[in-house]
């Protein structure tokens, strides 16, 4: 599926199928055309039925989904979940689900995965006595195209949520689709400019992709984004993930391979990393101080990634020292 196909407007009169002159449309493309015609004729019931069939075809899945969602037809995920279920054709995480042999319903799996992340984050924050719903401001860093953002916005509203990513299209999509604030990150940690400090900085599955050369640097820079009394939550591929993938860690407890599910970022700066718990604790101690760690939960997110919660001292605590 090319970009223009994925970006097809829900009100278009005909799909941009991208066919060669002598190429016949696929079954999904024929259904997509039929669904568009029914929409033009005002037959929403018929269009919903036909587009649901087009949504089951891999080559027209995302186009059919966009039409069903934008026209609020029967069968839309928006009606089921009560949030904006628009998915960008540039979303590498959705592409991972769509291309995975075990995913028989990529749309459902993708959207449910974000919901699951929300519940796991809420449990983690309850454990440290700082509930998500009472958090005044949240920065979702390395946010991607909104797999989790849409659920966070439903919980907190867009005004309390800021996103940041190194991929410009990801930030633009989240801002336009979910109404959140956003800013572009950088490949070099020290070049990131924080517009403000945040009560919670949530960094899901960034450190599970970082090379050794930037691992501690990112931890230090992200710590600077946390307001006094606020939290930094980040995740890693720990021992379970390493064992599952048959990875042998080095003497420091670290492993890196220059490849990932991302098509937008160079593998040398965003690959796949595995870290033993002692490695992570040592980096925390040398970067922000061991006393900053207030909670850890191994194998917490997706029953696969370890979670670490750091808390920055409040101004009152600083004054007392």
Image (cartoon, rainbow, N blue to C red):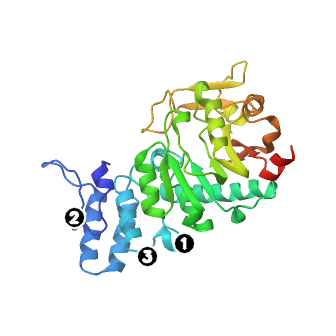
Whether residue 14 is situated above or below residue 320 in the rendered picture: below
Label 1 element class: loop
Pair 1/2: label in front: 1
Q: State which tag comes first along the sequence, 1 or 2.
A: 2
Label 3 environment density (alpha carbons within 10 Å; few <14, some 14–19, many ≥20):
some
Residue situated furthest top in the rendering: 251
* Residue 105 visible in this rendered orientation of the protein: no
Residue 188 is tagged as: none
Residue bearing mark 3: 74
Residue contact at pointers 1 and 2, CB within 8 angstroms: no
Q: State which tag comes first along the sequence, 2 or 3.
A: 2
Q: Position of residue 150 (x, y in %)?
A: 54, 61
Residue contact at pointers 2 and 3, CB within 8 angstroms: no
Residue contact at pointers 1 and 3, CB within 8 angstroms: no
Label 2 element class: loop
- What is the C-alpha distance between the residues marked 1 and 2? 29 Å
Q: Residue at x 45, y 70 (%)?
A: 76
Whether residue 69 is situated above or below residue 275 in the rendered picture: below
Q: Position of residue 123 (x, y in %)?
A: 75, 57
- The quadrant holding residue 265 is top left
Q: State which tag comes first along the sequence, 1 or 3.
A: 3
């Amino acid at each position: 599926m090319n970009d223009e196909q994925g970006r097809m407007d829900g009100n278009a009169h005909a799909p941009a199928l991208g066919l060669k002159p002598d190429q016949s449309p696929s079954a999904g493309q024929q259904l997509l055309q039929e669904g568009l015609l029914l929409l033009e004729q005002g037959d929403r019931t018929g269009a919903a039925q036909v587009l649901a069939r087009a949504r089951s075809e891999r080559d027209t899945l995302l186009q059919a989904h966009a039409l069903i969602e934008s026209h609020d037809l029967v069968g839309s995920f928006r009606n089921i979940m009560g949030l904006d279920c628009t998915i960008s054709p540039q979303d590498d995480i959705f592409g991972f689900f769509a291309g995975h042999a075990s995913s028989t319903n990529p749309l459902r799996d993708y959207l449910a995965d974000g919901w699951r992340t929300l519940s796991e984050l809420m449990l983690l924050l309850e454990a440290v006595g700082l509930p998500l719903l009472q958090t005044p401001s949240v920065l979702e860093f390395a946010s991607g195209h909104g797999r989790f953002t849409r659920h966070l916005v439903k919980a907190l509203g867009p005004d309390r949520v800021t996103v940041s990513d190194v991929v410009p299209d990801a930030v633009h999509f989240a801002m336009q689709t979910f109404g959140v604030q956003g800013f572009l990150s950088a490949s070099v940690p020290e070049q990131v400019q924080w517009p403000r400090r945040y009560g919670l900085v949530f960094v899901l599955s960034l450190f599970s992709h970082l090379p050794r050369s930037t691992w501690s640097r990112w931890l230090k820079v992200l710590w600077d984004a946390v307001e006094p009394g606020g939290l930094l939550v980040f995740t890693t591929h720990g021992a379970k993930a390493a064992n599952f993938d048959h990875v042998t860690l080095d003497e420091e407890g670290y492993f890196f391979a220059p490849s990932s599910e991302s098509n937008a970022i160079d593998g040398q700066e965003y690959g796949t990393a595995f870290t033993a718990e002692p490695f992570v604790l040592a980096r925390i101690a040398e970067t922000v101080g061991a006393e900053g760690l207030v909670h850890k939960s191994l194998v917490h997110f997706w029953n696969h990634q370890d979670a670490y919660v750091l808390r920055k001292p409040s101004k009152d605590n600083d004054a007392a020292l």
